[in-house]
Amino acid sequence: MKSTHKAIYPGSFDPITNGHVDIIRRISKIFDEVIVLVSHSSDKSATFSVSERMALIKGALPEMANVKVDSHEGLTVEYAQKAQARILVRGLRAVVDFEYEASMGNINKTIDPHIETVLVFASPEFYFISSRMVKDVAKNRGPVEDLVPANVVSPLRKKFEKKSERSGK
């Protein structure tokens, strides 16, 4: 029986950015199957619901047959165990990301020694993009077209138009 290499790329993806898409495209060429896992937590307030984030991700990746999108609440390692995946992919932008991801990788390894964390460097043209910064630009009505996939631009703008209307700004 052929062993398949299944990787999970977890994140909040609130919203998915061009940096995320770049990493997904690159890892989809390395692994037989990639699961983009939308993590959700009741501790965080998200701009987009889990179902909205999943739809935006699917809309940004229509041509990738070996990429699936799913969601999970709880430990990513538990999801990986159920999905029979042993590889977690994390993107790196800066030294601060490295410290956090190294700690997270070690915690995951403590929980399940069979899980490996693979760190993928952001491509230089996407190094500066984060979902948090994208939302800040959108909130202040700045240009987001070069930061997020085309299918995300309008929903992102609408979210912040609604928030401005509610707050009276």
Image (cartoon, rainbow, N blue to C red):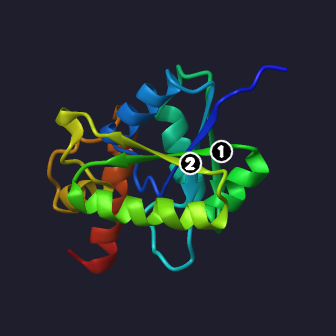
Residue 48 position, x and y percent, is 47, 59
Residue 78 position, x and y percent, is 71, 61
Residue 139 position, x and y percent, is 23, 62
Does the CB distance between marks 1 and 2 fall below 8 Å? Answer: yes
Q: Residues within 10 Å of mark 1 (few under 14, many from 20)?
A: some
| Label 1: element kind | loop
**Amino acid type, callout 1:** Arg
Residue 58 position, x and y percent, is 55, 36
Picture disc at residue 86 = 1
Observer-nearest of 3 and 35: 3
Left or right placement of residue 12 versus residue 17 in this view:
right
Q: Which residue does the image show at 34% across and 76% down from the upper left?
A: 166
The N terminus - image quarter: top right
| Label 2: element kind | strand
Residue 24 drawn above or below residue 113: above
Q: Point out the residue furthest to the right here.
A: 1
Q: Which residue does the image show at 54% across and 52% down from the upper left?
A: 52
Picture disc at residue 116 = 2
